[in-house]
Each structure stands twice: as C-alpha cells, then as structure tokens.
Amino acid sequence: MSDAPLPVFDGHNDALLRLAGRPPGDPRAFLERSEAGHLDLPRAREGGFAGGMFALFVPSKRKREQKPERSESGYDVPLPEPPKLAEAQRATLALAASLFRIEAASDGRLKVVRTVGELRSCLADGTLAAVLHIEGAEAIDPELDMLEVLYHAGLRSLGIVWSRPNAFGHGVPFRYPSSPDIGPGLTEAGERLVRACNRLGILIDVSHLNEKGFWDVVRISDKPIVATHSNAHTLCQVSRNLTDDQLKAIRDSGGMVGVNFAVSFLRRDGHNQADTPLATIVEHVDYLIERLGVDGVGFGSDFDGATMPAELGDAAGLPRLIDALRERHDEATLRKLCTENWLRVLEATWRA
C-alpha cells in the first residue's frame, strides 16, 4: 500500500443517517474513531477520504408488509410509501443541523462547502469538505420554497427520488435482474424542479431515477448529467445501474458517474455478499472509462448505506482500492478518478 494516500472526493455517503440515532447535538460519533459503520473523521483521514456528498435521506416510517420476493434467479424488494411533506421536512432539517453541529465542533477539521473554491481550499489544507446532498426530494414542496431555503443553507446536490416514487418522479425498485425502464417519467413538478436546480446551481443526481425520468432530465437540463453512486448495467443487471445508452448520454453531456461500492450493484449475480473482491470495483471503473472516457468517472462509495467489499472495509481502506487501480492506470488517471473529475463537473454546475 502507498504511504501517502491520494485524496478522494466521494459522491455519496449515508453517515448522517447512521448517526441520527445518537443523542441529538452530539458530534463525537463522527469526530471520534468508531468501529461502527464505514465513515468517521479519523478513518476518513487515514484513508484519504478528503470530502464528499453527505446525504440527507428520510426513511419511510409506514412500510409495506410484503417481504422481498426471491427466486433462484434474483429478487424484487417492495418499496415503502414515501414520507409526508411535513415529516420529511422535519427529518431533513434535523439531519442538516447535525452536519452543522459536527462542523462547529470540529475545530476547523470539517467544513460544509458551498463553492468549488472552498472545496479546493479544503483539499489543499486537509480539511474534510462536506457537501449537503438530498437523496429523494420529499422535503421539497411543490412551490419549491424549501429548495430556496436549503440552497442558501448549503444544499448543492439533489437526487430527485430515492427508489420510492414522490411528487416529482419515480425511482427504480431494488430488483434483479431488471432493466431501469420501470414506470413513468418526471411529473410537471419534477420538470420545474430540474429547471430550478439549473437556475440555482444545484447538481442533479440521477442515481435512483428510473429510465424515463432519466431521459426527461437529459431533455430538460442544461448542466452535466451526473449519477453520484451508480454502476454499469451490462456488468450487473440490477435496476439501479445504468445502461450503455444512458452512459452515452452522460458522456455527451460532459457528466460523470461515481462508482458505487455496494456489492449488490457490483456483482454479476447481484448477491449481497461482502466477500466480493476489489477487482469487481476495478472492473466497473474500467468499463465506465471505456464508455465515458477518463474524464467521466469518479467514486460514489455509498459508505454507511450498503454492504461494502470486506477487502475494502471502510473509508480507511480506500488506499487498497487505489493500489488495485494503480496496477492498471497511471497517476494522472488516478488523480482524475479521485478528485479532478468531480471538481470539473462541480465547476460546470455550481454558480460559484
């Protein structure tokens, strides 16, 4: 393993949701090292995790009673109902507040960044850069008032849907094997949301969006198309992954894909098994580079939101992945994968 890990900017983690069960206002769960989950400040520093999108995700309280349907060839997981607007707004504000509390207690070791200039400064001086990201826009009202408020609070990235449907569009269920072509496209409110994000300079994440919604975003948006944490459907035929036609559209827009480390989105058999080798991540990276070019691929780990390959473990294990990639790629390519491609896309998307 290399002595000095390359700094990594990461497209997606669910650390705030994992920490939500801790006492409110207590940032130590992130600032102190833990064996729980995948990401905290000490492990981030050890592994070169220099920054990333910190997701605000609201779990459903009203879950459907159906159990996952399994067969010899795959599975289909029924989706829960989305939370109500008021419930989603309370939970989203609480998660955002938890990140601001971590920032305040970090003694300058973590900063919520709102511009690419701030992000570059953090990468240069070793401050962990946190970007506020919404995963599923249930907290956004149809008038988009909350979008304006959250933008001024620091929101710079938004996934229109998680896998469940909402007022703006339709996600893909967790289904294997399956195409992402499931259900209708964006609603009229969803189209307004895309245009508002373009106006404000908020990155639009298509990771959980179904295929018709994806093509609606391609049609409407004037910014690069970005999937913050998705993989190649050709290599793993789960509904969450991107087809070659989608990858071409992302390439043509100047966008990018953050490779998801979740094993069930990596493995050709779709199984949720931690004994998945790092070579499987490398396979997806290489395939995406072939389809998107070397400027169109980064990382979108899904730390604290999925099962990771045991060989990777957690954020501290990122140098092992970089070393596996180093066997196939030069240092200039590794720098693009780790940070430079994200910086390019954010510069093309954010207002400042």
Image (spheres, rainbow, N blue to C red):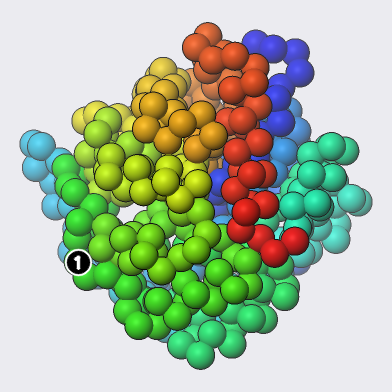
Can residue 319 be seen by looking at this rendering? no
How far across and how far down the image is residue 316, in percent? 65, 28
Q: Position of residue 332 (x, y in %)?
A: 64, 21
Which residue ends up furthest to the bottom in the rendered image? 143
Identified at 67% across, 52% down, the residue is 347
Which is nearer the eye, 187 or 154?
187
Which residue shows up at 84% across the image and 37% down it?
124
Q: Residue furthest right?
A: 107
Read off the residue under disc 1. Answer: 183
**In which quadrant will I find the N terminus?**
top right
Q: Is residue 94 left or right of residue 64?
A: right
Classify residue 110 as left or right of residue 269: right
Pointer 1: residues within 10 angstroms few (<14), some, or many (20+)?
some
Q: Callout 1: helix, strand or loop?
A: loop
Amino acid at the residue labelled 1: Gly
323 sits left or right of 234 in the view: right
Identified at 32% across, 47% down, the residue is 246
Which of the 4 image quadrants contains residue 309? top left
* Position in image of residue 41 (x %, y %): 74, 41
Q: State the residue in front, 161 or 333.
A: 333
Give the total number of marks visible in the rendering. 1
Work out whether residue 66 can be spotted.
Answer: yes
Position above or below: 247 against 199: above
The quadrant of the image that shows the C terminus is bottom right
Location of residue 9 with respect to 132 vertically, above or below: above
Q: Position of residue 27 (x, y in %)?
A: 76, 57
Q: Residue at x 37, y 39 (%)?
A: 231
